[in-house]
Amino acid sequence: MSRLKEVFSRGKALIPFITAGDPSLETTAELVKEMSAAGADLIELGIPFSDPVAEGVVIQKADLRALAGGVTTDRIFGMVSGVRQQCDVPLAIMTYFNPVFIYGPQRFMRRCAETDIDAIIVPDLPFEERADLLPVCNDYGIDLISMIAPTSQERIHMIAREARGFIYCVSSLGVTGVRQELGRDIERMVGMVKEVKDIPCAVGFGISTLRQAAAMATVADGVIIGSALVKIIEQHGGACLPYVAAYVKDIKEALKEIPAPKR
């Protein structure tokens, strides 16, 4: 069983996102270990980028802080190598196509494989242009995660047929960020995916509270939480570890109470 399959075989998956290098790479390494111990099933590491078009202001600011601190893609891979000596939690890289292109797709995926990264998510890579990256991902055993949104409509079946690892379901239109209300299309979107392929669906964009996480988990296989965690990190800086760990633990405990949806 692949590690991503195992992630979703244990129940509702909790997938926290943090920006690598915010507030420092040393803190990021400790956060990965602390979140894994607190119950995170898969962790997304964002590579900071100067033009993150899918991100709201919270993650944009985190990217700028990390870049101002001198974070580079090479330094992130080096940090992950160090983490891997102590922690084997599954990891996914969240990045944009430009950083991968500049680094070199072959070199990027080779480094992912060398540091035991399981998947990559590229929000600005349209499904129709996945051939620009998919063959290289396949060469190195890295799952290129597909994304669907409420606007995907009839494309959902097409995307689902070709998807690997899991499908990232965008809960609402717009960029990332904490929301009071989430989109109401998730159940329909997940149902359309399951019609053509038995692949896990994880919901992201806007989830921040126990209530929201539980609601999304009743119809999906996992929840992705980013901006709420990045706000905690922004508030507490290098002292954020216990606050992030407590938040992750609370969300994970809530997800354990959610039964599998009937299909």
Image: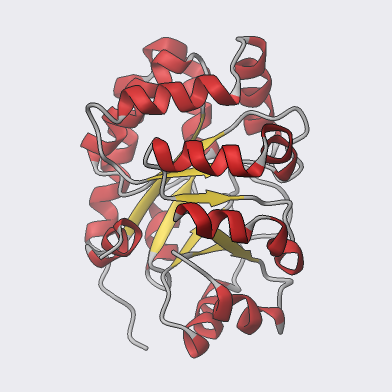
Q: Quadrant of the C terminus?
A: bottom left
Say if 50 sits above or below 206 in the image: above
Q: For residue 183, what is the image quadrant?
A: bottom right
Q: For residue 128, what is the image quadrant?
A: bottom right
Q: For residue 10, what is the image quadrant?
A: bottom left
In this orientation, does residue 145 appear? Answer: yes
Residue occupying image coordinates x 43% and y 47%: 209
Measured from the top left, where is residue 140 in percent x and y?
48, 52
Q: Is residue 185 left or right of residue 207?
A: right
Q: Quadrant of the N terminus?
A: bottom left
Which of the two residues, 225 or 102, is positioned nearer the viewer here? Answer: 102
Residue occupying image coordinates x 67% and y 38%: 104
Measured from the top left, where is residue 236 in percent x and y?
45, 15
Measured from the top left, where is residue 89 in percent x and y?
29, 42
Which of the two residues, 101 or 254, is positioned nearer the viewer here? Answer: 101
Measured from the top left, where is residue 86 in percent x and y?
22, 27
